[in-house]
Amino acid sequence: MKSLLEEVRRVEQEAELLIRPEELEAALDLMATEISHRLGDTTPIILCIMTGGLVTCGKLLTRLHFPLQLDYLHVSRYRNQTAGSDDIAWLGKRPEHLAGRHILIVDDILDEGYTMQAIVAFCRQAGAASVSTSVLLDKASARKTAITPDFCAFTIPDRYVFGYGMDYKSFLRNAAGIYAVSR
């Protein structure tokens, strides 16, 4: 554990700040306005994707001023690593009340797209009336699927990032900005 903590501290010290906290907050305001405009009269279920989507979802919820319900999915391709595996692990319960409902999936980042694609398919198979996706960051250049987010705050380059809910080996989710690991 000591060597991992030393690595984490080194990564944090050498990281490049990509997006400042005030930029993130302003972008979340804009996303909330767009979401409100498009989904405000649908009484959606917000599905927070754990654990990375927790910060984005929490910050969005306080900006959405319409009736909604909140639930979560806990899935992972990374499992505390810096590269995703080929399979998606469903780590928690799966919501059972999605039929006929409008769903907004909220996650931290969309990169290759495999996880989001699987979650959208799950919601559609459960009979959702509509499924929309929202991410803080879109790493479009890394995409290996055809999925694109309906709502997005920033498009970023294909770099490993942490902060605002995103982690480096399960640490640094609490960093106030978005940081890229040094190359």
Image (spheres, grey):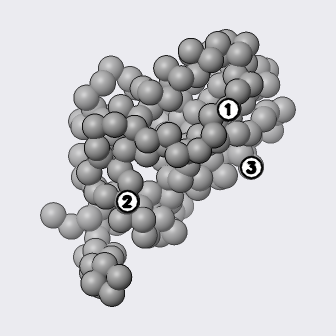
| Identity of the residue furthest to the right in this view | 67
Residue plotted at (65% across, 25% down): 103
Residue plotted at (36% across, 31% down): 114
- The type of residue carrying mark 1 is Pro
Label 3 vs label 2: CA separation? 29 Å
Q: Disc 1 or 3, which lies upstream in sequence? A: 3
Label 1 vs label 2: CA separation? 24 Å
Task: Specify few, some or many for label 3: CA neighbours under 10 Å numbering under 14, 14-19, or 20 or more.
Answer: few
Which quadrant of the structure image shows residue 76? top left
Considering the numbered disc 1 on the image, is that residue within a helix, a strand or a loop?
loop
Q: Position of residue 33 (x, y in %)?
A: 66, 35
Eye-nearest disc, 3 or 2: 2
Of 86 and 13, the residue lying toward us: 86
Which quadrant of the structure image shows residue 37? top right
* Residue 8 seen from this side: yes
Task: Determine whether, in the image, residue 42 is placed left or right of residue 171.
Answer: right
Q: Disc 3 or 2, which lies upstream in sequence? A: 3
Task: Specify few, some or many for label 1: CA neighbours under 10 Å numbering under 14, 14-19, or 20 or more.
Answer: few
Q: Give the labeled residue for mark 1.
A: 95
Q: Is residue 180 above or below residue 95?
A: below
Eye-nearest disc, 1 or 3: 1
Label 1 vs label 3: CA separation? 22 Å
Of 21 and 53, the residue lying toward us: 53
Q: Give the labeled residue for mark 3.
A: 62
- The type of residue carrying mark 3 is Thr
Q: Which mark is residue 80?
A: 2
- The type of residue carrying mark 2 is Asn
